[in-house]
Amino acid sequence: EAQVTQNPRYLITVTGKKLTVTCSQNMNHEYMSWYRQDPGLGLRQIYYSMNVEVTDKGDVPEGYKVSRKEKRNFPLILESPSPNQTSLYFCASSPGQGDSPLHFGNGTRLTVT
Amino acid sequence: GDSVTQMEGPVTLSEEAFLTINCTYTATGYPSLFWYVQYPGEGLQLLLKATKADDKGSNKGFEATYRKETTSFHLEKGSVQVSDSAVYFCALLPYNNNDMRFGAGTRLTVKP
């Protein structure tokens, strides 16, 4: 089954404790992206990647890192999480050509205390 | 830059009522337009799309027409069901990059 898989689904952590949210897709998509969803703000892009070893900042990259060492994986790293990073995070992928829609994972709800 | 503005919710309707969720956009060139739906506890799923002016996207009884003259892509359904309760996002994909832009989302609740 074609899918985007994120882990974990829920995560509660404390300020400053490094964490990684994993994202993997099995559709051989070139384009991958991370979003955060906050009430009243819709989805805001954090980082995206056009292909292996190619990553770029989105609208709200501060406090986040990503890497794209393999085509299928695009982990999101929070080196020193803060409470304002409490949010619902989505990974998405697409073939990256023409008018291809995004395929989304089921989300990771992160709480930073 | 390119952006999407959609009607703020929440929207509450009775079953079988008519639904309209407004969406307007600002973009250079000719973007592709999308509606995504998010059911509770899930990620966004593509509902429908339109790639050029006057195209009509449709799926599951929902429709939206790409109107270049009014820069709009309003979502409509003639008779909503309880199972349509979800958050709906309007989005655009610029013609020259992969940076999908989303509206703020509209929560729809349909009561029996």
Image: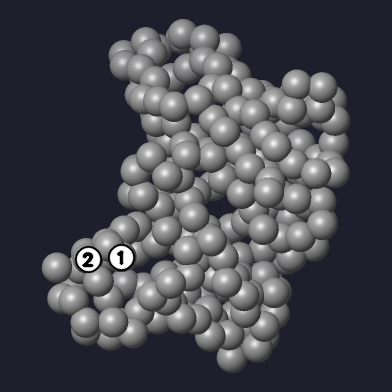
**Picture quadrant where residue B29 is located:** top right
Residue displayed at 25% across by 71% down:
A82
| Chain letter of the residue carrying label 1 | A
In this view, which residue lies farthest toward the bottom?
A69
Q: What residue type is labelled 1?
A: Gln
The residue at which mark 2 appears reads as A83
Label 2 element class? helix
Give left or right: position of B68 versus A23: right
Picture coordinates of residue A110 (x, y %)?
27, 65
Judge whether residue B27 can be spotted in this image.
yes
Picture coordinates of residue B74 (x, y %)?
63, 23
Residue displayed at 35% across by 79% down:
A78
* CA–CA distance in space, label 2 to label 1: 5 Å
Residue displayed at 37% across by 10% down:
B14
| Chain letter of the residue carrying label 2 | A
Give left or right: position of A108 versus B53: left
Picture coordinates of residue A6 (x, y %)?
42, 70
- Determine whether label 2 and label 1 are within 8 Å by CB: yes
The residue at which mark 1 appears reads as A85
Give left or right: position of A28 versus B11: right
